[in-house]
């Protein structure tokens, strides 16, 4: 971030970058929280990055529903109709439920400080999950058996990073 010239006094540009260019939510959270900690920004970067990432994540809902319906329609037989319960994964319902609870609670005047322990706990669990994944990764085996998928992943990451930076530059955010 500093090499690219992101401001170290505001978390906005780096938060948008992390929310768009970093792949999974736990990595976005870890990346943004680290930036905040390095430059004493409180949770400015984390808040921006998580908002951007969750906005991207919300796109999963209609995509999953449409794809689930199409696959269910293709696989149904003459005696069975497509069942909505079979095409909606439970994690989507939990995500929507958590979002609704938080939104309703804050709109009804519940102080944001009430959620501070949960926010800290969620960061702790995400860091633990990332550490567990890293500690269980056999790098030598990964490289020797997975060169094509790793190359594809690296290419996708580079493309997403480039597009994210380009759009931020074109929109005068960075």
Image (tube, rainbow, N blue to C red):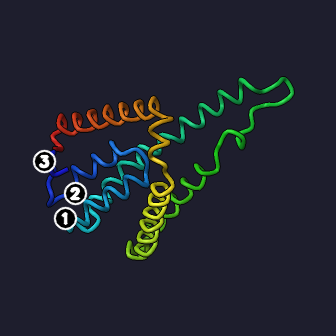
Question: Do labels 2 and 1 touch, CB within 8 Å?
Answer: yes
Q: Residues within 10 Å of mark 3 (few under 14, many from 20)?
A: few
On residue 5, the disc is 3
Inter-mark Cα distance, 3 to 1: 14 Å
Corner quadrant of residue 155: top left
> With respect to residue 51, does 118 lie above or below?
below
Disc nearer the start of the sequence (2/3): 3
Disc nearer the start of the sequence (3/1): 3
Q: Pinpoint residue 159: horizontal percent, then vertical percent.
A: 31, 31
Q: Pinpoint residue 72: horizontal percent, then vertical percent.
A: 71, 30
Inter-mark Cα distance, 2 to 3: 12 Å
Q: Residues within 10 Å of mark 1 (few under 14, many from 20)?
A: few
Secondary structure found at label 3: loop
Secondary structure found at label 1: helix
- The residue under the point 47% across, 36% down is 144
- The residue under the point 48% across, 66% down is 125
On residue 159, the disc is none
Q: Pinpoint residue 120: horizontal percent, then vertical percent.
A: 41, 71
Left or right, residue 151 beside residue 142: left
Q: Nearer the viewer, mark 2 or mark 3?
A: 3
- The residue under the point 47% across, 45% down is 58
Q: Of residues 143 and 110, which is closer to you in this image? A: 143
Per the image, the residue denoted by label 1 is 39
Per the image, the residue denoted by label 2 is 11
Question: Do labels 3 and 1 touch, CB within 8 Å?
Answer: no
Left or right, residue 31 beside residue 5: right
């Amino acid at each position: 971030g500093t090499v690219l010239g992101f401001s170290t006094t505001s978390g906005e540009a780096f938060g948008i970058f992390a929310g768009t260019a970093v792949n999974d939510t736990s990595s976005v959270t870890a990346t943004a929280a680290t930036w905040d900690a390095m430059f004493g920004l409180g949770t400015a970067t984390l808040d921006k990055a998580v908002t951007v990432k969750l906005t991207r994540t919300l796109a999963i809902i209609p995509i999953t529903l449409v794809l689930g319906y199409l696959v269910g329609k293709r696989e149904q037989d003459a005696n069975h109709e497509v069942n909505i319960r079979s095409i909606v994964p439970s994690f989507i319902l939990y995500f929507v439920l958590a979002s609704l609870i938080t939104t309703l609670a804050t709109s009804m005047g519940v102080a944001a400080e009430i959620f501070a322990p949960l926010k800290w706990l969620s960061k702790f669990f995400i860091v633990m999950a990332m550490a567990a994944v890293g500690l269980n990764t056999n790098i030598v085996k990964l490289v020797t058996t997975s060169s094509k998928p790793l190359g594809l992943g690296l290419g996708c990451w580079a493309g997403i990073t480039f597009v994210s930076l380009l759009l931020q530059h074109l929109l005068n955010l960075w």
